[in-house]
């Protein structure tokens, strides 16, 4: 019986493809071919890091390869839904970088295609699936360490930097807007930790503070939600200062009725340049947990889901709802 997957890659426009591919290779997957449109800024690094993964002339060569089980997609965000649909229709399961789509029409087409094909469309929400401290927090919450979760506060700060960015990075229609793009991470975590399967958007806002000459760019956003399991507040920005040793001081505060958890995902400010710090406070203890050696369960679970046609890595409906709320919040913010 087959115990691993053969992968193909379509679109390497975003650097998230490196972590996506690395984690799957760590789990024993193989990858021989990729295709990408044009010459993205990531191409030279991709070729250097994966010299044995050969580029195909067109994506159809990958889609028509019967030896490939799953497609990894990290193209320009607006193109991800189309590539996903093509892959699903070709009989491939899909792991796509977030945002997995940028419009509600795209999302509806994806839902229909998944239903028709029976294949998996999984979004790699890296701020959950690549962060060991978040995996540990899920474990602690499920054990009842902070009681019933009432609220999450999630921050998604990023650094603009002085390095070269592709044109699509500043084009609203291409990247989907700051809430769709970055906020989908935090909305997904809000749903997970409050155990909500429906939610309403109370407030959403986006702004462009730093690049008035690029009207499609958004460098600040916030969202407030109420779910049927709890509440959520989300703040997003592109304001990370140069002195910070990482691209963003991403944090997640999970408030329960018997305690709380704070996650410092990528750094512990002025103390440690390492990430994966978790702080737990409840009625029995207050402690810091270094989560750097905690296993990331998403990737092995997703492989098993593909092999066994199960749904353990992330429920499909949760993936849909995460994107639906992110896109609706983006639309609501832009109506103001």
Image: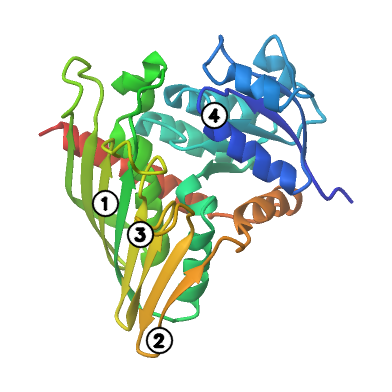
User: Which residue does the numbered mark 3 point to in the structure image?
Assistant: 252
Q: Residues within 10 Å of mark 3 (few under 14, many from 20)?
A: many
Disc with the residue nearer the chain's start (2 vs 1): 1
Q: Is residue 90 visible?
A: no
Residue 135 in picture, x, y percent from top left? 53, 62
Residue ID at (35%, 43%): 244
Disc with the residue nearer the chain's start (3 vs 2): 3
Q: How many marks?
A: 4
Disc with the residue nearer the chain's start (3 vs 4): 4
User: Which residue does the numbered mark 4 point to in the structure image?
Assistant: 74
- Seen in the image, is 16 located left or right of residue 266? right
Give the CA distance from mark 4 to mark 2: 42 Å
- Seen in the image, is 156 located left or right of residue 56? left
- Seen in the image, is 261 located left or right of residue 44? left
Give the CA distance from mark 1 to mark 4: 24 Å
Give the CA distance from mark 1 to mark 3: 9 Å
Residue lying at the far left of the rendered structure: 336
User: Which residue does the numbered mark 1 point to in the structure image?
Assistant: 234
Give the CA distance from mark 3 to mark 2: 20 Å
Disc 4 on helix, strand or loop? loop
User: Which residue does the numbered mark 2 point to in the structure image?
Assistant: 285
Disc with the residue nearer the chain's start (4 vs 2): 4
């Amino acid at each position: 019986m087959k115990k691993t997957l053969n992968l193909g890659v379509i679109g390497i426009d975003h650097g998230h493809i490196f972590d996506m591919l690395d984690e799957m290779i760590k789990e024993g997957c193989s990858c021989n071919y990729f295709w990408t449109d044009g010459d993205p800024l990531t191409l030279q690094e991709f070729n250097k890091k994966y010299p044995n993964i050969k580029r195909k002339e067109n994506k159809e060569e990958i889609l028509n390869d019967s030896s490939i089980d799953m497609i990894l997609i990290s193209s320009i965000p607006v193109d991800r839904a189309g590539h996903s649909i093509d892959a699903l229709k070709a009989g491939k399961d899909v792991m796509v970088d977030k945002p997995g789509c940028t419009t509600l029409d795209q999302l509806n087409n994806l839902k229909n295609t998944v239903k028709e094909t029976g294949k998996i469309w999984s979004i790699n929400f890296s701020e959950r699936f690549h962060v060991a401290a978040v995996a540990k927090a899920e474990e602690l919450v499920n054990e009842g360490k902070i009681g019933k979760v009432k609220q999450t506060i999630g921050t998604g700060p990023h650094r603009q930097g002085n390095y070269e960015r592709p044109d699509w990075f500043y084009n609203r229609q291409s990247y989907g807007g700051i809430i769709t793009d970055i906020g989908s991470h935090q909305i997904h975590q809000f749903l997970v930790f409050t155990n909500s399967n429906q939610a309403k958007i109370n407030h959403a806002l986006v702004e462009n503070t730093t690049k008035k000459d690029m009207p499609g760019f958004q460098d600040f956003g916030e969202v407030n939600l109420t779910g049927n399991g709890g509440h959520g507040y989300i703040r997003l920005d592109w304001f990370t200062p140069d002195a910070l040793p990482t691209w963003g001081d991403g944090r997640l505060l999970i408030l329960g009725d018997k305690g709380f958890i704070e996650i410092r995902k990528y750094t512990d400010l002025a103390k440690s340049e390492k990430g994966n710090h978790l702080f737990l406070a409840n009625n029995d203890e207050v402690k810091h947990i270094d989560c750097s050696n905690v296993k990331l369960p998403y990737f092995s679970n997703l492989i098993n889901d593909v092999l066994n046609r199960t749904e353990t890595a992330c429920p499909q409906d949760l993936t849909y709802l995460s994107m639906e709320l992110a896109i609706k919040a983006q639309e609501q913010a832009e109506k103001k």
